């Protein structure tokens, strides 16, 4: 949750941020979910549960629910691609509201109007002497027998959110991972990046930093690809977990958090805003056109870049051709036209009021929006959150009340830059600063068989003890670390 604006007196009054509430492709194995919800329960136990007889409620909690309800939530949330600002994502929000409201928890949508980015037009071609020009499809291929092939047509075309609009035709330069030191190395080798198209592979640093580093080195555009050395070292999907040859990693290049038009203040109705032009000119924006491409397309580009041989640690994996620095003779003709527009996003906020310390908040959250279907990131986490809410509701029917107030949050537009959560925190900063005890986040909750957790150091021991309370038949802990 971004850095935490409502009452600061510490009183036990009703929570001011929630007036009464006004009158759905999931290819994820859910077997670790009992571990997840059990560990989430145990980790939060000391934060909001009452005594006496804690073991009674704990054992009761673990006996409630099943994978079936979580699987149903995951299916409903991921049946269609649901990028922030789209109708499909609004339907996913409605599902979350319905699920939480069914437990009689006061639940509401909190909406904001924010600047989001979508692709309007994209093209990329590759030419070189004595070679036919290659026009890249810029499309992820489905696999034979994919039951979701038809609905995949709803996926927004591959793009890098907030990349600058423009057209560039220039020689390509290979920039390794696009780190500042990689561009410094090119300069030291006498490789001129000015006006060129920087070609960099994903990994090591944030994609937005790759594009910004290219801009600062003088490049006019950037192309990011997934190198087989990093993303295809085993069997590719659907036969294994690794990225297929035409898979493309999309994402945001915005380095800030929240609505780019309201930096450091909430995007409330009638608030002051930067213009779209001012927001896009911010140092947090990449500033040059950029496109993501697949490993297959990236390899085609790399093979036609000449010049000096790149150093050993810049080379590809086993069987890859020799990587060279350039510039050229490969020429890339890149066009990206973005549609930066105001869009409505919707957080879902639900409250379980505490009995002994209602003015103290334990907040559990996760986002809902996804670049495509979001089976793992984020909606395995949203399904877990809804499963946890159901179990807390069943406990209430047995007489349980939380010691402190629990706030369940389902954020929107997090993929763009933690947008939904940041706007809510900015709107409620003073209250949250004075009252929040802890924030527990669940994002990519289920992927593989392991249990992964990270936390501030104060929660290290709590996480370890929580994991020990899971029944051995459900325990499969691969890694538990703090950051």
Image (cartoon, rainbow, N blue to C red):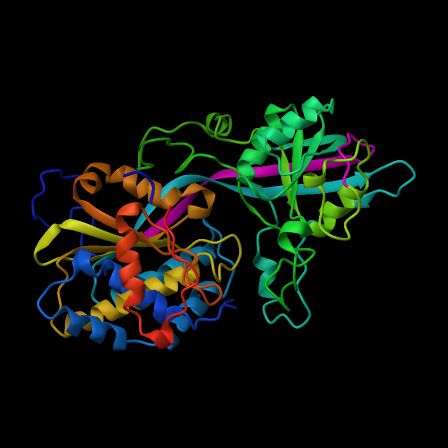
Image x and y of residue 186, in percent: 69, 27
Queried whether the magenta region covers residue 337, the answer comes back as: yes
Quarter where residue 183 is shown? top right
Split into 4 quadrants, where in the image is the C terminus?
Answer: top left
Residue 41 visible, this orientation: yes
Query: Is residue 336 highlighted in magenta?
Result: yes
Residue 259, how many percent across, how many down? Answer: 40, 37
Nearest the viewer among 46 and 124 is 46
In the rendered image, residue 316, in percent from the top left (x then y), is placed at 71, 46
Q: Quadrant of residue 480?
A: bottom left
Residue 58, by quadrant, is bottom left
Image side of residue 70 versus residue 430, left or right: right
Task: Give me the residue at 7% from left, 56% from top.
Answer: 356
Magenta residues, as a range? 323-349
The main secondary structure of the magenta stretch is: strand
Q: Is residue 369 left or right of residue 121?
A: left
Q: Residue 299 vs residue 475: left or right? A: right
């Amino acid at each position: 949750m971004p850095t935490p604006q409502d009452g600061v007196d510490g009183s036990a009054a009703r929570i001011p941020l929630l007036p009464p509430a006004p009158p759905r492709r999931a290819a994820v194995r859910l077997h670790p979910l009992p571990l997840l919800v059990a560990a989430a329960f145990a980790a939060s136990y000391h934060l909001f549960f009452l005594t006496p007889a804690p073991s009674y409620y704990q054992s009761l909690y673990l006996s409630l629910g099943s994978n079936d309800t979580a699987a149903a939530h995951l299916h409903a949330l991921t049946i269609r691609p649901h990028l922030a600002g789209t109708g499909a994502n609004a339907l996913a929000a409605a599902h979350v509201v319905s699920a939480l409201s069914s437990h009689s928890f006061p639940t509401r949508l909190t909406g904001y109007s924010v600047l989001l980015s979508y692709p309007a037009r994209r093209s990329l071609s590759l030419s070189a002497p004595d070679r036919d020009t290659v026009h890249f499809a810029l499309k992820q291929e489905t696999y034979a027998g994919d039951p979701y092939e038809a609905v995949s047509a709803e996926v927004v075309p591959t793009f890098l959110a907030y990349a600058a609009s423009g057209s560039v035709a220039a020689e390509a330069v290979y920039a390794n991972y696009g780190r500042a030191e990689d561009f410094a190395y090119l300069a030291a080798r006498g490789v001129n990046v000015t006006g060129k198209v920087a070609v960099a592979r994903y990994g090591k640093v944030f994609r937005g930093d790759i594009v910004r580093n290219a801009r600062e080195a003088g490049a006019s555009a950037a192309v990011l690809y997934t190198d087989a050395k990093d993303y295809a070292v085993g069997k590719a999907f659907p036969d294994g977990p690794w990225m297929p040859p035409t898979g493309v990693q999309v994402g945001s290049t915005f380095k800030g958090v929240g609505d780019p038009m309201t930096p450091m203040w909430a995007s409330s109705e009638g608030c002051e805003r930067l213009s779209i032009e001012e927001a896009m000119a911010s140092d947090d924006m990449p500033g040059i056109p950029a496109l993501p491409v697949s490993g297959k397309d990236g390899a085609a580009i790399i093979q036609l870049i000449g010049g000096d041989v790149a150093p050993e640690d810049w080379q590809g994996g086993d069987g890859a051709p020799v990587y060279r620095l350039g510039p050229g003779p490969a020429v890339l003709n890149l066009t990206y036209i973005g549609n930066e527009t105001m869009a409505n996003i919707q957080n879902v906020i639900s409250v379980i009021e505490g009995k002994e310390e209602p003015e103290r908040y334990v907040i559990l959250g996760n986002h809902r929006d996804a670049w495509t279907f979001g089976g793992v990131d984020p909606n395995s986490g949203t399904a877990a959150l809804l499963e946890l809410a159901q179990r807390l509701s069943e406990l209430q029917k047995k007489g349980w009340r939380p010691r402190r107030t629990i706030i369940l949050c389902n954020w929107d537009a997090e993929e763009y830059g933690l947008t939904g959560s940041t706007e809510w925190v900015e709107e409620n900063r003073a209250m949250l600063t004075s009252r929040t005890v802890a924030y527990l986040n669940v994002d990519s909750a289920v992927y593989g068989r392991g249990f992964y957790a990270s936390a501030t150091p104060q929660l290290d021991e709590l996480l370890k003890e929580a994991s020990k309370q899971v029944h051995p038949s459900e325990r499969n802990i691969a890694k538990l670390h703090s950051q």
